[in-house]
Image (tube, grey):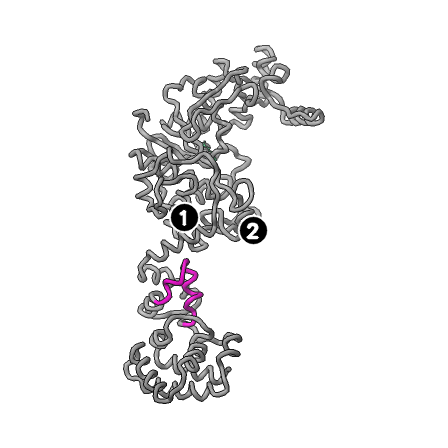
Amino acid sequence: MSDKKVRVRFAPSPTGPLHMGGVRTALFNYLFAKKHGGEFILRIEDTDQTRFVPGAEEYIIESLNWCGLTPVEGPGIGGKFGPYRQSERKELYKNYADKLVESGWAYYAFDTPEEIEALRKDAEANKETFSYGIGTREQLNNSLKLSPEIVQQKIEAGEAYVIRFKMPENTDISEDDLIRGKVTFNTTKSLDDKVLFKSDGMPTYHLANVVDDHLMEISHVIRGEEWLPSMPLHVLLYKALGWEETKPRFAHLPLILKPVGKGKLSKRDGDKMGFPVFPLQWTDPKTGDVSRGYREDGYFPEAFINLLALLGWNPGTEQEFFTLEELGEIFSLERVVKSGSRFDPEKAKWFNKHYFQQKSVDELATLFTPVLKEKGIDAPAEKINAVVAEIKERCEFVSDIWEQSSYFFVAPNEYDAKTVKKRWKEDTPAKLSEIAGIFEKVKDWNANSIKDSFSAFMNQKEWGFGVVMNPLRLALVGGNLGPDLFVICELLGKYESIGRIKAAIEKI
Ligand code: GLU
């Protein structure tokens, strides 16, 4: 690596919620910066006013914060290369576009959108695709064809124009991608004359992106594979602007693929298979449609980060669990693969389970308390802790805690029909009545002493344990589930346990 200070940026466009692939791009940039003692920057690329979505920028920032990927410079943070929102840097791009025209690397084009559309249609009718560039530009309405006087007149008359890059003819553009190795594009075969500056006074992505990467002294451009086709244009822009010496290195990350079938992971896959593709829940400001998020679905950010890290990167060992800090020590672009990596929603849950199990009972109880409050349940902290300790092992998500433990907080008002049919016999009520009587007499209400009194009584009666234990469980929890029965009794308390036995005798 060169001795240039490592400065990387995450440069999303606020056109909607951030896809998990976008979060992975941010993560890899963040880790690369950490690994090299560099700086991770957030830049908002909002020059396409037609695609601006209100709330998207806030969403992006909140997502990064939730994941712990905090930039050192960015909108709302500041930094000496600011502003970090391209719409606020608007004034500075035109100058560079003009320079490119002056040096012959770009030209003014006056073709209206309608004219271009007509050319596109004509080409289509001949089963061809229209491209504004090497083969066509000499015949079109631009400063390559028109005389300088006419061009001057048009501009002075206020005619709308764009500035296009003039792709050099038949040139091979090669660049060493840090993940893909040498990548070569031929200008005539694959590259058109991209618009750099639009008639609305805004730069396009290409110009603003390159200008800002240069001005912000970005050392490495790490971004998704979908930007690989833009690389030759960007490389040429560095050359045209005289910035070749300090041009950043490029690394294009592999796609994240659908769990099944071909193609990249989309929101539709998530909807179909029931998993989120966005870090946080998102409500579309136009339609009001709500898309689920990892956070709201109960994932821990540690789990989300861990699973993203392994989509396209591997440590070269068997290790699968990593903290953000550990990743920042061992991450390297050399271990990022070229080919797409398949997302596995089951594995995502498995990661969450791991981090869930790692949490202390106290932490989980703290997370579970609001769930109870929302249900109008105000239980003492010791009880919540004790319940969580009992059922923790059976859970992957905080939401599972309620599923596994609701009967500790609310008495059953229904009894599982199958269990009733199998376990509730004619003499069950009489037997349970006697048990309730035994429970009344237990002095120290804890699992051990309840068990002792119960066992002594059972031995004396010579009743089979199953004959009583199963309907007793049914009476206390409403079904055939839960941990040790005497532990349940202890946590429910004496009067609640006895009350539930009596209620079951009445209701079943
Ligand atoms: N604004 C682009 C995006 O939305 C940035 C691509 C890049 O990193 O160059 O992804």
- Magenta stretch holds residue 392: yes
List the residue tagged with mark 1: 304
Residue at the spot 35% in from the left edge and 86% down from the top edge: 459
Q: Secondary structure at mark 2?
A: helix
Residue 8 visible? The answer is: yes
Q: Amino acid at mark 1?
A: Phe
10 Å crowding of disc 1: few (<14), some (14-19), many (20+): many
Mostly what secondary structure, the magenta segment?
Answer: helix
List the residue tagged with mark 2: 272
Work out whether residue 307 or residue 300 is closer to the camera in this orientation and state it.
Answer: 307
- Magenta stretch holds residue 309: no
Magenta stretch in the rendered image = 390-407
Which one is earlier in the sequence, the residue at label 2 or at label 1? 2
Residue 141 visible? The answer is: no
124 vs 194, left or right, is right
Quadrant location, the N terminus: top left
